[in-house]
Amino acid sequence: MKVDPDDLAAAMEKDPAIIDENDAIKYHTGLQAVSMYRESHELWIKGEKEKAREINHRAHQLTGCDIHPGATIGKRFFVDHATGVVIGETTIIGDDVSIYQGVTLGGVSTNKGKRHPTLGNHIVVGCNASVLGNITIGDNVRIGAGSVVLHDVPDDCTVIGVPGRIVKHRGVKVQHELSHNDLPDPEEDEISLLKKEIAELKRELAELKSKQ
């Protein structure tokens, strides 16, 4: 199995559990999945699709990650814990993209044309997130764990929730560097809002009682 040096460097940088390069090459399922994808993709674009699919099938069995050989993926692609990752045939991914376990970059139709997402550069997709359909995700985007993204996302955004919604955008202050597990909690925000509304209702009720 040939390992791309840029993919290896990305894995070494982004996964602190890796012991050394030999450990990464032999045991890191994400790096193995990406390396086997690159081999299958070269065959796919040469028209050797049967051989490409054989490698894709072996990669799925070995790593639990299913990257279609027809997908187009840029430099320094990092997959952490490859289990459950699915990347569809017409997906396009830019450079310096990281995805975590259970991520789906999938389609929402059965047409033969472009039906999977296009991701820009410097993107993090958190575990078990789904990005579905022929949509475009801009550069420097963070997609929170478990989110379902169905519409285009512009550059420099944070997206969370089901369906996914933008909670941070260009020009809005971010207090610290964002990791895939370090995202705003919309449920906590809703609970805080409800608490404020309840407190206000109690105050109004107390005022009414005092006037009786």
Image (cartoon, rainbow, N blue to C red):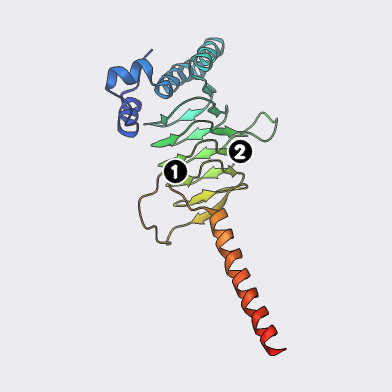
Q: Is residue 202 left or right of residue 155?
A: right
Among numbered discs 2 and 1, the one appearing first in the sequence: 2
Determine which of the numbered discs, if any, sits on residue 181 in the image: 1
Q: Is residue 12 left or right of residue 108?
A: left
Q: Are marks 2 and 1 in contact (CB under 8 Å)?
A: no
The x and y percentages for residue 115 are 63, 34
Looking at the rendered structure, the secondary structure element under dot 1 is loop
Q: CA distance from mark 2 to mark 1?
A: 21 Å
Q: Nearer the viewer, mark 2 or mark 1?
A: 1
| Residue depicted at x 50% and y 12% | 55
On the image, which quarter does residue 7 sit in? top left
- Disc 1 marks a residue whose amino acid type is Asn
Determine which of the numbered discs, if any, sits on residue 113 in the image: none
Frontmost residue, 173 versus 119: 173
Given the current orientation, which residue lies at the most extreme right position? 212
| Residue depicted at x 34% and y 28% | 11
| Residue depicted at x 61% and y 75% | 200
Location of the C terminus (image quadrant): bottom right
Dot 2 corresponds to which residue? 132
Frontmost residue, 119 versus 178: 178
Question: Image height check: is 101 above or below 195?
Answer: above
Q: Is residue 89 left or right of residue 79?
A: right
Frontmost residue, 195 versus 139: 195
- Disc 2 marks a residue whose amino acid type is Leu
The x and y percentages for residue 54 are 54, 10
The x and y percentages for residue 206 are 65, 80
Q: How many marks?
A: 2
The x and y percentages for residue 57 are 55, 14
Question: Image height check: is 142 above or below 6?
Answer: below
Looking at the rendered structure, the secondary structure element under dot 2 is strand
Q: Is residue 10 left or right of residue 155?
A: left
| Residue depicted at x 48% and y 20% | 41
